[in-house]
Image: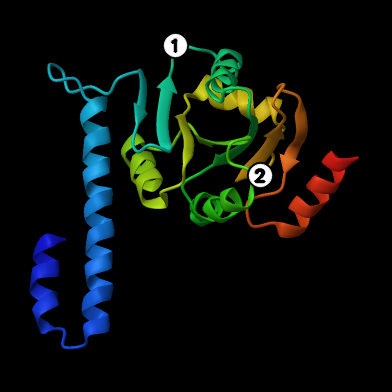
Amino acid sequence: MTLWYRHIHPTLSNAYYQYALDEIYHIESQDTLRLNQAKEVFYTLDNNRKADQYSIDLTSTMHIYKDFSKNGAQLWKEIRDKTQDKAIYAIFWTNDTFGRRALAESLQLRATLLQEKVAFVYLSEYTLNEDVWLENIVKSNAPGLHVKLDKEQNDFFAEDWRISRVPHSVFVDARGKYIDRNAPLPADREGWEALWAKMAR
């Protein structure tokens, strides 16, 4: 990226294009730094294997978490404990256009909600490669708790949340009661209006 930036930037005569390229380079550099920092934690120095458990703050608002020692029910309890008595909006996503779009669109939804009352949680399908998972998280810049699942945990959520398509969302109140096991996706404005009306009854 740096070589490309240094090669292209001097050839741009339009100040607007120079500014746009500077912004792209800045964002990409930040993403690369955060991604490298995260990867360093996942590999032990002695055997170069990824850890089975970790909890890392990528930024002040982005957290990544994995614990393959817990079953699905235990992990869900741990997630609820980590959200500190907030309501939870959780998105189960996969590495495809729709999943990555849900990550990106969650930023706009988060801006419309009371952030001190609603925690965003993102659970990736277990088959997603960890490096790709990390890259998607960093590039999405989606604040919240990002959780990596193993197969047993994945199957627990698929059954408990009755997932029939992905991405899939659920909304849980601060006491852990399901408000909607098939909650609207972030960009579904009509669905959110209906959900608010349901909660106001």
The answer to whether residue 195 is above or below residue 18 is: above
Q: Position of residue 44 (x, y in %)?
A: 19, 20
Residue drawn at the location 44% of the way across and 29% of the way down: 148
Q: CA distance from mark 2 to mark 1?
A: 27 Å
What's under tag 1, amino acid-wise? Ser
Q: Is residue 165 left or right of residue 139?
A: right
Q: Is residue 163 visible?
A: no
Q: Is 19 on the left or on the right of 99, as rendered?
A: left
- Residue matched to label 1: 69
- Identify the residue at the far bottom of this view: 13
User: To which quarter of the image does residue 61 belong?
Assistant: top left
Q: Is residue 148 left or right of residue 75?
A: left
Camera-nearest residue between 102 and 126: 102
Q: Position of residue 111 (x, y in %)?
A: 57, 52
Question: Local crowd at mark 1 within 10 Å, few (<14), some, or many (≥20)?
Answer: few
Of residues 104 and 150, which is closer to you in this image?
104
Among the two numbered marks 2 and 1 on one chain, the one whose residue lies closer to the N terminus: 1
Query: Which is closer to the viewer, label 2 or label 1?
Result: 1
Q: Residue at x 13, y 76 (%)?
A: 8
Q: Quadrant of the N terminus?
A: bottom left
Q: How many marks?
A: 2
Disc 2 designates what residue? Answer: 165
Q: Image height check: is 117 above or below 42?
A: below
Q: Is residue 39 visible?
A: yes
Q: Quadrant of the C terminus?
A: top right
Q: Provide the secondary structure element on which disc 2 rests.
A: loop
Q: Is residue 13 above or below residue 22?
A: below
Q: Quadrant of residue 129?
A: top left
Estimate the x, y position of residue 151 in percent, counting from the top left. Answer: 50, 24
Residue contact between numbered discs 2 and 1, judged by CB atoms under 8 Å: no
What amino acid type is highlighted by mark number 2? Arg
